[in-house]
């Protein structure tokens, strides 16, 4: 695969990684400056399987945001090439951003295989095996140096919420995953452990109970009004319907109960060329939210209000990088 030339000047590490991914997208889509095409013609010409068609549209949106194409509905015009860092720097960029091993491996192996991935000649799971797992990649997607800061902020908010309530405080963590947030919370507030309910949908070491955020909570043994605090690190974007899941969390909490969670914001080029292949729907299914895997801050704000929460705190890290993460702190209404 041919990558466009390196741009003049030196962008930040996260921007360099974005540019490498954007260049790989442009190469896989066989973009030629000045060409005018439809999305449908591109999908057919590249023999993209139906369940990955959404990714082609998301790639074109990302390329349009960076001025590479002009996208108008189903038609796009190629305006130019992508200038980015050389693919040989990938390992260094992954290391500098402290991207998890599973995601770094998948990203490195996926870039030269994007056309084959679109055709389903090779799958993301096959690129991970036997070194890593799909669950590991999903748990680690978008985790990087920025997220540790938010884990600590979450831990402080949970401690404050716990100290404002009479003991014992009942905490439910949704999707303990890699255990990063769990470790931060319990390091700050070890007294919470006795009434701390760890949950996940997979066999993580810390899992004590199974809870799927896309299913009825009460039917899974999590009854209404049985939690004072709910925490979730890098989990809630897996909800098929954000508002429905937030309503379930609202009902799980006591009136005045608090929700603290972190989530990536915006679909960055690295995810679009790696872990997003793992989000393609099963045959016959639909991709969540029309392909917006990591919803915007505005979408979360709207969903929280609709579910009966009052947003108290919102913090973003990652600067102008597309690899931004948010923390939300909301309180259930007392009505």
Image (spheres, rainbow, N blue to C red):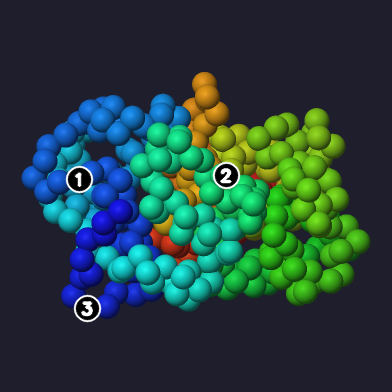
Count of marks, rendered view: 3
- Residue at point 57%, 44% (across, down): 125
Q: Closer to the camera: disc 1 or disc 3?
A: 1
Residue 20, image x, y percentages: 33, 61
Q: Are marks 1 and 2 in contact (CB under 8 Å)?
A: no
Nearest to viewer (mark 3 / mark 2): 2
* Residue at 11%, 48% in the rendered image: 33
Find residue 31 and report its image quarter: top left
Q: The residue tagged with tag 2: helix, strand or loop? A: helix
Whether residue 75 sits left or right of residue 61 in the image: it is left
Residue most extreme to the bottom: 9
Quadrant for the C terminus in the image: top right
- In the rendered image, the quadrant that contains the N terminus is bottom left
Residue 289, above or below 188: above
Q: Position of residue 106 (x, y in %)?
A: 51, 55
Mark 1 → mark 3, Cα distance in angstroms: 24 Å
Give the residue displayed 58% in from the left and 51% down from the top.
128
Give whichever of 175, 40 is nearer the camera. 40
Q: Which mark is residue 260?
A: none
Give the distance between the C-alpha atoms of the residues marked 3 and 2, in whole angstroms: 36 Å
**Relative vertical location of residue 202 with respect to residue 93 in this rendering, above or below:** above
Horizontal relation, residue 283 to residue 196: left or right? left
Residue at the (70%, 55%) spot, across then down: 177
Marks 1 and 2, how far apart in space? 27 Å
Q: Position of residue 95 (x, y in %)?
A: 50, 73
**Which residue bears the numbered disc 1?**
31
The residue labelled by disc 3 is 9
Residue at the spot of label 2: 125
| Pointer 3 local density, CA inside 10 Å: few below 14, some 14–19, many at least 20 | few
Residue 234 position within the rendered picture, expressed as x and y whole percent measured from the top left: 60, 55
Label 2: few (<14), some (14–19) or many (≥20) C-alpha neighbours in 10 Å: some
């Amino acid at each position: 695969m041919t990558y466009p030339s390196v741009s003049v000047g030196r962008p930040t590490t996260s921007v360099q990684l974005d540019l490498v991914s954007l260049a790989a997208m442009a190469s896989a889509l066989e973009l030629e400056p000045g060409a005018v095409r439809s999305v449908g013609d591109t999908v057919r010409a590249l023999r993209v399987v139906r369940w990955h068609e959404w990714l082609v549209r998301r790639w074109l949106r990302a390329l349009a945001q960076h001025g590479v194409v002009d996208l108008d509905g189903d038609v796009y015009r190629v305006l130019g090439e992508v200038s980015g860092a050389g693919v040989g720097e990938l390992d260094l960029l992954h290391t500098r951003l402290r991207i998890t091993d599973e995601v770094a491996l998948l990203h490195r192996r996926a870039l030269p295989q994007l056309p084959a991935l679109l055709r389903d000649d090779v799958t993301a799971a096959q690129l991970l095996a036997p070194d890593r797992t799909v669950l590991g990649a999903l748990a680690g997607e978008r985790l990087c140096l920025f997220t540790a800061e938010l884990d600590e902020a979450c831990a402080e908010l949970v401690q404050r919420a716990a100290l404002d309530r009479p003991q014992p405080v009942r905490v439910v963590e949704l999707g303990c995953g890699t255990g990063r947030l769990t470790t931060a919370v319990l390091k700050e507030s070890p007294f919470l452990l006795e009434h701390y309910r760890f949950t996940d949908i997979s066999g993580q070491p810390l899992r004590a109970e199974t809870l799927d955020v896309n299913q009825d909570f009460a039917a899974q043994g999590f009854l209404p009004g049985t939690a004072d605090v709910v925490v979730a690190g890098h989990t809630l974007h897996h909800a098929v319907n954000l508002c429905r899941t937030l309503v379930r969390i609202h009902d799980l909490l006591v009136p005045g109960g608090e929700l603290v969670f972190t989530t990536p914001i915006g679909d960055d080029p690295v995810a679009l060329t790696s872990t997003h292949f793992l989000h393609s729907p099963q045959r016959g299914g639909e991709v969540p939210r029309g392909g917006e895997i990591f919803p915007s801050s505005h979408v979360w704000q709207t969903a929280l209000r609709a579910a009966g929460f009052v947003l108290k705190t919102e913090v973003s890290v990652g600067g102008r990088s597309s690899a931004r993460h948010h923390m939300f702190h909301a309180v259930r209404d007392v009505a």
